[in-house]
Image: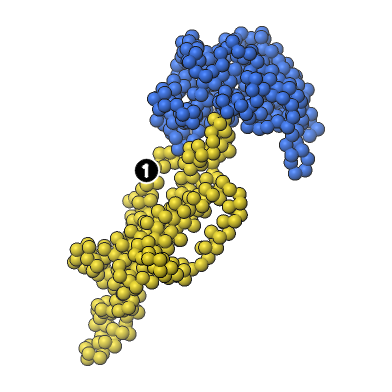
Amino acid sequence: MTKSALPVTVMTLLLLAAWYVGAAWLNWPQAAETLARAGKPTAFADVLAQAYAMKRPILPTPGQVVVELWNSLTGYAPTSPRNLLFHTWVTTEAALTGLAMGLVLGILLAAGIVYTRTLEASLLPWVIASQTIPILAIAPMIVVILGNIGLTGLLPKAVICMYLCFFPITVGMVKGLRSADPLWLDLMRTYSAGGMRAFWSLRLPASMPFLFASLKVSVAISVVGAIVGELPTGGQAGLGARLLSGSYYGQTVQIWAALIMASLLSVALIAVVRGLELVLLGRAGAR
Amino acid sequence: MTFPNPQDVREATAARQGSGPAISPAASPVVVEARKLSLVYPTADKPVTALSEVDLTIARGDFVSLIGPSGCGKTTLLRVIADLERPTSGHIAIEGMTPEQARLKRLYGYVFQAPALYPWRTVERNVMLPLEIMGLPKAERRQRAREQLERVGLSGFERKFPWQLSGGMQQRVSIARALALQPDLLLMDEPFGALDEITRDHLNLHLTQLWRATGKTCVFVTHSIAEAVFLSTRIVVMSPRPGRILDVIDCDSLPRERTLDIRESPEFAAIAHRVREGLKEGHSYDD
């Protein structure tokens, strides 16, 4: 831990420095123009200060984003739509619901594919085809169709997440359910254990490391799915809505704050999955 | 490591067999009977004859070793007895039943070449696996598992995971797991093949004591002459291409109670010599 602290710190500082340089470079023309129009001095230091303090910069500085995050998180109650936590929760809810649905669908599909040869031939091409359609194209369709049959709010977003999530889980679980050692399967046969018993006592536990590898991918794309799902709904709540309203009004600082929040959310969810993996498989998996 | 007193174990086993489903020793003295047993694998270029017209009778309480070079069908024969392979022709009966009936009745315990422990289960839960499948109540499962682990000298390792044990200890767990079913017939496929010679000597001594204590019928596959002579009451010498029986050697000249010292005796040397001659006869150097 201490060994990696120094390189990580150096890298972070370099990135922040690059960000500040980039912000100055991108905001410079606008800042210089604003100062000139107001008849203020346009020396290097003046323009730089203005470039870092604009209300609607092309690229806000990390400092501006942190201040925006801080104000939003501490200035309002967590239930207020002006607090980013409120939006983060809305997105998390959809992402986790979708992940759960994707988990069930993915495992069912994988079990079908592993146990039925005809399903492997008939289903697998469709599963792969489903992932070649850009989610941005199909997400509004899902919202429209589900809205038409009276389903709005959380569910359409969760369905979009599920659509993205199930694929890594199906692929991982097909491999996982087939990962049981032939000797382990022979052993089940010597106990004259039936198919269901072999599934629950052997194939499913043997697939767990594969499931967790897939889950880490799925949980991150589930957050992306939830955000994409919030865009066509017109932006009432959620990190996606926050991004949309930010772009309507040119509020780049707000957009960046929402982006940072979304990535923090993904990191946190992956950490939770990793924690679950350690608790459930830690001792048995350490080989 | 301490071994249980054989007398105690024999009494304990006899007491349990009275209540269990086990076949009483008064039943037919023949446990396995094979007549003109053949097994041919269809392969891409030409069919491979794994077993050719094998005749074999195994009596109750015998310790029979199948010995021969790779490809002589010794493992195949064991797998046919266990109903893990189906013969293409000939007749085989286990306790007067077909191998499938015997397997469904869980009449035998099988020890594989590798320990084949499930890595996500603790040692104790590995031994309890067959008992779970039999549907025994939890208390009895735990008690039987403890008994068998004690019998193989692994008391105190119940909560360990397989990766925390040495190869020899893992194989002892797999023997305990086979014994937990309380079968009359123990089938072992080169269980000590992957272990170093010192560990192997140790486990052989342990195994012969276990066999004498429990009175089980054992069928043991090996390619070590010393191991076969040390353990067996009868040795079946097999030869490859096609897999067939060359010689069946009785080891009556050796006492039933064996210590590592008997390996220095002239009787031991005489039997080992006969096995070696048999193997030489079946070996052709032209392929």
Say above or below: A73 vs B78: below
Residue A117 location (% of width, % of height): 61, 49
Name the residue located 67 percent from the left edge and 22 percent from the top edge: B93
Q: Colour of chain A?
A: yellow
Name the residue located 46 percent from the left edge and 21 percent from the top edge: B148
Question: What residue sits right under mark 1 in the picture?
Answer: A279
Mark 1: few/some/many CA within 10 Å (<14, 14-19, 20+): few
- Mark 1 is on which residue type? Val
Q: Can the viewer see residue A51 in this picture? A: yes
Name the residue located 79 percent from the left edge and 29 percent from the top edge: B284
Residue A15 location (% of width, % of height): 35, 67
Camera-side residue of A242 and A267: A242
Q: Quadrant of residue B79?
A: top right
Q: Colour of chain B?
A: blue
Q: Is residue A19 shown left or right of residue A74?
A: right
Camera-side residue of A243 and A2: A243
Camera-side residue of B273 and B43: B43
Q: How many marks?
A: 1
As drawn, which residue projects farthest toward the right?
B286
Q: Can the viewer see residue A59 in this picture? A: no
Label 1 resides on the chain identified as A
Instruction: Determine whether the residue tagged by mark 1 lies in a helix, strand or loop.
Output: helix
Name the residue located 54 percent from the left edge and 36 percent from the top edge: A194
Say above or below: B202 vs A231: above
Q: Quadrant of residue B198?
A: top right
Residue A143 location (% of width, % of height): 41, 68
Camera-side residue of A208 and B283: A208
Q: Quadrant of residue B128?
A: top left
Say how the picture is coloured: by chain
Say above or below: A251 vs B192: below
As drawn, which residue projects farthest toward the front?
A149
Residue A34 location (% of width, % of height): 26, 87
